[in-house]
Image (cartoon, rainbow, N blue to C red):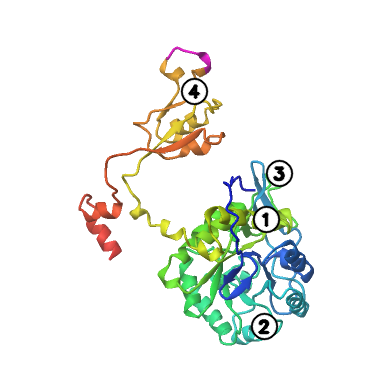
Amino acid sequence: MSSQKFKKLNKIPVDLSANCAGIESPNPFWLASAPPTNSADQVMRAFDAGWGGAVWKTMGEDPPVINTTSRYGAIDIGGCKMAGLNNIELITDRPLEDNLREIREVKRRYPKHAVVASLMVPCERKNWHDIVRRTEDTGCDGLELNFGCPHGMSERGMGSAVGQVPEYVEQVVGYVKEIAQTPVLAKLTPNITDIRYPARAAQRAKADGVSLINTINSVMGIDLDTLSPRFSVGGKGAHGGYCGPAVKPIGLHMVSQIATDPECKKLAISGIGGISTWSDAAEYLLLGACSVQVCTAVMHYGFRVVEDMLDGLTRWMQEKGFQKTEDFIGKATPNLVDWKKLNLHQKTVAKIHPEKCIQCDLCYVACNDTAHQCIVRPIDLGTDGDPKNLRLPKVLEELCVGCNLCALVCPVEKCITMETVETGHPPLTWEEYVAKGMTGYGEVYKRFHD
């Protein structure tokens, strides 16, 4: 869980309710379309635990889906289990009529919670019209079109095979919007060069919003004894979809790309990817998402993980003085700019706090072997003194370029901090640098941006 320490709170009332593309829910925490939303029993238990919404595990036409065993693999990093999760599971293998009947029952029992139906059928108008009519008859709150699944279904011309081609996205969303009576979200694949192109295509077809990211193409590893992939099906393996905490930076980046794109202004965003804590969710909301979808954390810890998410987000909002989620959605987007707009005169240097140092030498090795050789130790300089201090690292500030590497490798919290140094120079960006003719790149830069 997050280590965020809250200050004394103002006990202002907080409204966690969310509205994503017209889909309302008691809070912004939704279960993503995945194994946790495969049945009415699971979804209703999740709602009882505190989840605000659920996107039903993707449904398709009635011909049976056959899954493999095994179908999940994970990578552990340090002491973190399932830092990354890989799967080759397909869409629901339950009959369509069973799912539709259960969605109808869940909406009857939980009318104020968001129930979104995830759909995937072949790219024919008739197929989409048929499943949309049957699905909306359940009383569901919205539709999510799965253009993201990167394995199995994509080999049948669905999933990411659609999401990777903006023209297909526009075509299918268009089919659905011809008859849909509820909000439509297009679920986008990250397995693409620029996520903005399929998002723009979805907007052209009048989608109400997008959800992202779906899973990332991946192979979890190779068993060095058997030479088979980890995990395997009878000794053979296939690429699968990667998710979990490790993908959060990718999800944040792609959400921010759409949130800051002038051509995607009308799209609501449901953020997905590596959300395990309330603070993860807050980051997505600050970058423009109006709801967040969670899967791996639930598969790891169970439905009750939402209790900490609700409590943490409430406390943070109280500390910041936000009364409702709309008060801070997108607030961080102005701080994301192109590199050319960053201040080249900003200067920071590393400061090592000796009272916290455990003399592990990680900062010294990292700086001298791979960075800018600005950390030294008295013992290397031939300095006499107290033996216990001879290995204490010291930063040569005149050589420090403020790269942050030493602070990142240090195992002791706040032992190394990055301190701002006044340079006496006014802010200067690369864009301004070129415009003032201070570099020979001016004409090349101008032609590229023109």
Q: Which residue position holds label 4?
A: 392
Q: Position of residue 232 (x, y in %)?
A: 71, 55
Which amino acid, by three-letter code, is at mark 3? Asp
Of the residues tagged 3 and 1, which is closer to the observer? 1
Task: Give the number of the disc on residue 225.
Answer: 3
Q: Position of residue 165 (x, y in %)?
A: 51, 72
The residue range painted magenta reads 383-388
Compared to residue 197, the image places residue 423 above or below, namely above
**Does residue 386 belong to the magenta stretch?**
yes
Of the residues tagged 4 and 3, which is closer to the observer? 4
Residue reaching furthest to the left = 437
Of the residues tagged 2 and 3, which is closer to the observer? 2
Q: Earlier in the sequence, mark 3 or mark 1?
A: 3
* Quadrant of the frame with the C terminus: bottom left
* SS at circle 4: loop
Q: Earlier in the sequence, mark 2 or mark 3?
A: 2
Which amino acid, by three-letter code, is at mark 4? Leu
Q: Which residue position holds label 2?
A: 136
Q: Earlier in the sequence, mark 4 or mark 3?
A: 3
Q: Residue at x 28, y 49 (%)?
A: 428
Q: Earlier in the sequence, mark 2 or mark 4?
A: 2
Compared to residue 326, the image places residue 219 above or below, namely above
Disc 2/disc 3 C-alpha distance (Å): 51 Å
Q: Which residue position holds label 1?
A: 297
Disc 4/disc 1 C-alpha distance (Å): 40 Å
Which amino acid, by three-letter code, is at mark 2? Glu
* SS at circle 3: loop
Mark 2 and mark 3 in contact? Answer it, CB < 8 Å.
no
Compared to residue 387, the image places residue 327 above or below, namely below
Q: Position of residue 72 (x, y in %)?
A: 71, 57
